[in-house]
Image (tube, rainbow, N blue to C red):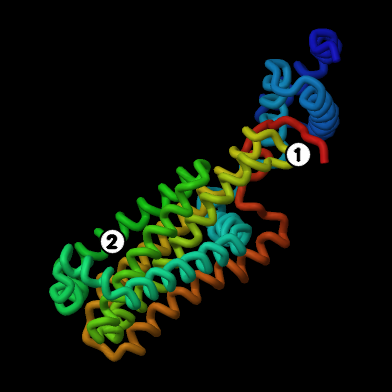
Amino acid sequence: MDLDALAAARAAEWDRLEALGRRSRLHGAEADELIERYQSAAADLAAIQSTAGETAVGTRLSILLGRARLRFAGRGSGGLTGVAAFFALRLPAALYRVRWLTVACAGAFVVVTALYWLWVANSPALLAVLSSQIDVDQLVNHDFVDYYSTYSGEAFSTLVWTNNAWVTAQCIAFGILGFYSPAVILQNAMNLGVQGALMGEYGRLDVFFGYLSPHGQLELTCVFVACAAGLQVFWAWVAPGPRTRLQALAEEGRAMFAIVVGLAIALLVSGLIEGWVTRQDWPWWIKTGIGTVALAGFLVVQWVAGRRAVKLGETGDLDAFEAGARRLVAG
């Protein structure tokens, strides 16, 4: 395609489209003309992008089309509507798309935790080495429980929330490297397996699960989702399909950013539970029940609302207009 020839042939039509797009008021005939010229220019843009990719001519035409679309489609119904759409559609869709990867990360975590637990619990030599390096008696009888009451509820909730939100954001941001998400799973599983084995060796499993289950259900699920989102970004780079790698990374990155926001909110809930509920001297079933309700709410958003959003065509990414012009691909 000769872009210069096309631009010269369509110059008058594109200029007219620009003029109509800039007008504050349009009467009936002008509105019809705007739509007709919009459709014609959109076909020109598709032809340019399919043959030449990103060009200055295509960029200018994309801007003209965007301005024209605002004239007949409007600018939306306000920020509150956008926020509602984000939480009702975009976020659930993004979470739903990584649901099976989340299950896989959770399964890997359970397996690795169990292996470390069995290894430590059935290895007297390893227990002796650990006992020589740390004060196990202090850990299982004092430090494990005292950790949850060292700070005030407000300070502790803020501390664990910011720390966990930062970790999950890193999982997604560095997920493109491929090894970061598995490393996070391995590290957390190893720590949990070793701590569980030590608490069990001293007959403190009731304390271990009693203090971990209220906040740990939602907190660990958030870690699994973050690792899954990181792997999703990595896979978009490895196997972009019919998209270019840059386009695949852009689309998945925008969708996974929605997950970052959702996890920050979920981890805030988890932090509040850890700061205010875990430390309480309540029956275990009350504290664990609160954590289970919080987890159930998150899973409803991911699996139920997410399935509905995906059926409506949501992917978690911005829509085509908000994301801007992109190159056409086959398939």
Foreground residue, 243 or 104? 104
Foreground residue, 13 or 217? 217
Q: Position of residue 225 (x, y in %)?
A: 50, 60
Q: Which residue is mark 1?
A: 242
Q: Position of residue 217 (x, y in %)?
A: 42, 73
Q: Residue at x 39, y 69 (%)?
A: 116
The answer for how far apart the CA atoms under marks 2 and 1 are is 41 Å
Foreground residue, 22 or 141? 141
Count of number-bearing discs: 2
Q: Position of residue 64 (x, y in %)?
A: 70, 25
Q: Where 61 sits versus 112, above or below? A: above
Q: Where 131 sits versus 166, above or below? A: below
Q: Nearer the viewer, mark 2 or mark 1?
A: 1
Which quarter of the rendered picture does the C terminus lie within?
top right
Which quarter of the rendered picture does the N terminus lie within?
top right
Q: Where 329 sits versus 312, above or below? A: above
Disc 2 on helix, strand or loop? helix
Name the kind of residue labelled 2 in the image.
Val
The numbered dot on residue 326 is: none
Q: Residue at x 33, y 83 (%)?
A: 287
Q: Position of residue 15 (x, y in %)?
A: 75, 16
Name the kind of residue labelled 1 in the image.
Pro
Which residue is most to the front? 125
Q: Earlier in the sequence, mark 2 or mark 1?
A: 2
Image check: 63 left or right of 11? left
The numbered dot on residue 160 is: 2
Q: Residue at x 79, y 22 (%)?
A: 48
Disc 1 on helix, strand or loop? loop
Residue 206: quadrant of the picture: bottom left
